[in-house]
Image (tube, grey):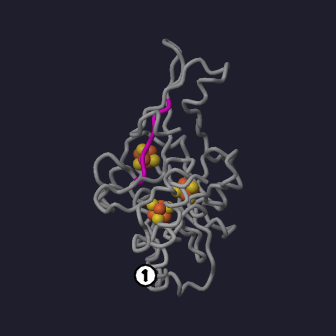
Amino acid sequence: MTAAAAAAATAIAAIATTLPTRSESKTDTERENGKESRTKRYGMVIDVRRCIGCHACTVACKSEFDVPLGVNRAWVEYVEKGVYPNVGRSFLPRLCNHCSVPPCVTVCPTNATYKRPQDGIVVVDSGLCIGCKYCIQACPYDARFLNPVTGFADKCDFCIHRVSKGLVPSCVNTCVGGARIFGDLGDPNSNISKLIANNQVTVLRREMGTFPNVYYIGADHTDELDAKRPEVRKVQVVTHRRHEERR
Ligand code: SF4
Ligand code: SF4
Ligand code: SF4
């Protein structure tokens, strides 16, 4: 470790000791969810065959959380492949994967990012966040950003304020194609569990070992990296993020 890195680590440790503990900064939603008796494991299935690329989910999420311009908690990527006239476009709705082994949690020096034991949702406690961006660098899915208004790390939280009241996340509620299905993966009788049991599903970047809880049916997961594969002649992903930022 360099002297500068050691000094930064010391500074962060000093800040962390002055921050409130999570129990002191509990939200109403957390308290409500704490009353739930059965542990859940929330997840989402995205059936790409049903997605029409309308971006209604992106807009609904923006509206739900007043997300500033230039950043997104949920978004839809366009995957364009082929060389004219043999070209095709598919859609890839995206959000935080609420990973079972989330590297964003491991690197957070203040425990601001954590996985809720009652339902597996990965959240950011803004009362503990110091805006160091470690989690943004650690996420292999570009699911996080520093909110330019608050200065804290931000991302999808499966709309816990809605879910705690028995509603589905806003992106699910607004999906005109019925492509986003939310539910309890721990309940074998839930719709989402049945979908996973009866369809071939995939996850993003399985090789990262993060065990995402967002599953895809019929997805084309190719991205810029696939351009290096000889069998793929041309791949272009249209996204709100610049190419360099997605590496
Ligand atoms: S997708 Fe990224 S931000 Fe979400 S839990 Fe996984 S590592 Fe963390
Ligand atoms: S920016 Fe991320 S890693 Fe840093 S304190 Fe906030 S949540 Fe934790
Ligand atoms: S709202 Fe549904 S159909 Fe429209 S882009 Fe989002 S996931 Fe696809």
Residues rendered magenta in the picture: 73-79
Which residue is situated farthest in the top direction here? 85
Q: Nearer the viewer, residue 8 or 151?
A: 8
Q: Quadrant of residue 38?
A: bottom right
Indicate the position of residue 232 as horizontal and vertical percent values: 62, 21
Q: Which residue is mark 1?
A: 25
Is residue 78 found inside the magenta-colored segment of the image? yes
Q: Nearer the viewer, residue 226 or 176?
A: 226
Mark 1 residue type: Ser
Instruction: Relative to 22, say whether 155 is above or below.
Output: above
Q: Nearer the viewer, residue 14 or 166?
A: 14
Label 1 SS:
helix
Give the dominant element type of the magenta stretch: helix, strand or loop.
Answer: strand
User: Which quadrant would the N terminus be assigned to in this image?
Assistant: bottom right
Q: Quadrant of residue 125?
A: bottom left
- Residue 157 can be seen in this image: no
The residue that appears at 67% across and 20% down in the rendered structure is 231
In the rendered structure, the answer to whether residue 152 lies left or right of residue 100 reads left
In the rendered structure, the answer to whether residue 102 lies left or right of residue 75 reads right
The residue that appears at 28% across and 48% down in the rendered structure is 69
The residue that appears at 58% across and 73% down in the rendered structure is 119
Indicate the position of residue 94 as horizontal and vertical percent values: 49, 47
Indicate the position of residue 142 as horizontal and vertical percent values: 49, 47
